[in-house]
Image (cartoon, coloured by chain):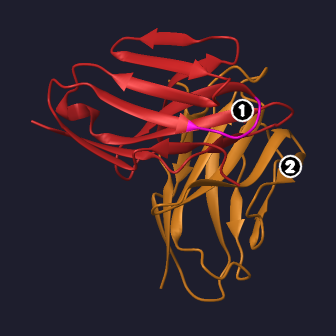
Chain colours: A orange, B red
């Protein structure tokens, strides 16, 4: 079955650590997205990529970095510069043309300890 | 920036009743989409309505779009306890490469 796989489901980060969240899709989608969800805040866009080896900052990119070396993969690194990283992180992808819904992964819950 | 704003923020109904959620947005759109999110899970795409469409149905879901008022509504008929979730609208703005989500409506359907 096609879909998006996010791992791990839960992640704990110590102060000053960088951590990487994995997002893999087998839907042959070109576009991929990372969103952050905080309680009562809805979804906010961190980074997105329309094509391999290219990505753009979203609304809250500071303290995060991404890469897009393969079509299937769009990992997100939460760096030590992100001062409040505790949140639920969602990865999504979509097909071409702008008239398709997004397919979401099941999310990674990141907690700072 | 959040384009879509859902109303109400929370809604509690009895099983069998209809649930209506509204979404308002600010700029011109290519399409508007509705998603469902069960607690602690990813979002699931429900329905997409294009800017030149006024109404769309999918099973027990009915979506309307009024571009003159920049608003949309999602109606769930004959609700079930399994419909309990948060519902989000998202807009694909003209000239934009990304969806912008609202803060969601939390729906509780009591058995």
Q: Quadrant of residue B30?
A: top right
Query: Do we see residue B8 in this rendering?
Result: yes
Residue B37 place in picture, x, y as percent: 41, 42
Chain ID at mark 1: B
Under tag 2, what secondary structure?
strand
At a point 53% along the width and 36% down the height, the residue shown is B23
Q: Are marks 2 and 1 on the same chain?
A: no
Q: Is residue B20 above or below residue A74?
A: above
Badge 1 local density, few (<14 within 10 Å), some, or many (20+)? Answer: many
Q: Nearer the viewer, mark 2 or mark 1?
A: 1
- Image quadrant in which you'd find residue A65: bottom right
Please give the residue where the numbered disc 2 appears in the rendered image: A55
Q: Which mark is residue B82?
A: none
The structure residue drawn at horizontal position 34% and vertical position 50%, both measured from the top left corner, is B39
Q: How many marks?
A: 2
Please tell me whether residue A10 belongs to the stretch shown in magenta.
Answer: no
> Image quadrant of residue B59?
top left
Viewer can see residue A28: no
Residue B61: % across, % down = 38, 18
Q: Tell me if residue B83 comes above or below residue A69 in the rendering.
A: above
Towards the viewer: B96 or A18: B96
- CA–CA distance in space, label 2 to label 1: 18 Å
Residue at disc 1, secondary structure: strand
Residue closest to the far bottom? A15
Majority secondary structure in the magenta region: loop
The residue sitting at 72% across, 28% down in the picture is: A29
Which chain's residue wears label 2? A
Residue A69 in the image, given as x and y percentages of width and height = 84, 47
Q: Which residue is mark 1?
A: B92
Residue that protrudes farthest toward the right in the picture:
A53
Q: Are marks 2 and 1 in contact (CB under 8 Å)?
A: no
Span of residues in magenta = B24-28
């Amino acid at each position: 079955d096609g879909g998006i796989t996010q791992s791990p489901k839960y992640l704990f980060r110590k102060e000053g650590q960088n951590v990487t969240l994995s997002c893999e899709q087998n839907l042959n989608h070109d576009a991929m997205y990372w969103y952050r969800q905080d309680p009562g805040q809805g979804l906010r866009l961190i980074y997105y990529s329309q094509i391999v080896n290219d990505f753009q900052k979203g609304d809250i990119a500071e303290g995060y970095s991404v890469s897009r070396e393969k079509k299937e993969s769009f990992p997100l690194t939460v760096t030590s510069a992100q001062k409040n990283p505790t949140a639920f992180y969602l990865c999504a992808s979509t097909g071409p043309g702008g008239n398709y819904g997004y397919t979401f992964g099941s999310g990674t819950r990141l907690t700072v300890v | 920036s959040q384009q879509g704003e859902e109303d109400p923020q929370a809604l509690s109904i009895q099983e069998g009743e209809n649930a209506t959620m509204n979404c308002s947005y600010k700029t011109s759109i290519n399409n508007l989409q509705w998603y469902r999110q069960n607690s602690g899970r990813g979002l699931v795409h429900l329905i997409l309505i294009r800017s030149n469409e006024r109404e769309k149905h999918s099973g027990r879901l009915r979506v309307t779009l009024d571009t003159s008022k920049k608003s949309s509504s999602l109606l769930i008929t004959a609700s079930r306890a399994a419909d309990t979730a948060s519902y989000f609208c998202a807009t694909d703005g003209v000239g934009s490469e990304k969806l912008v989500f609202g803060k969601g409506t939390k729906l509780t359907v009591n058995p």
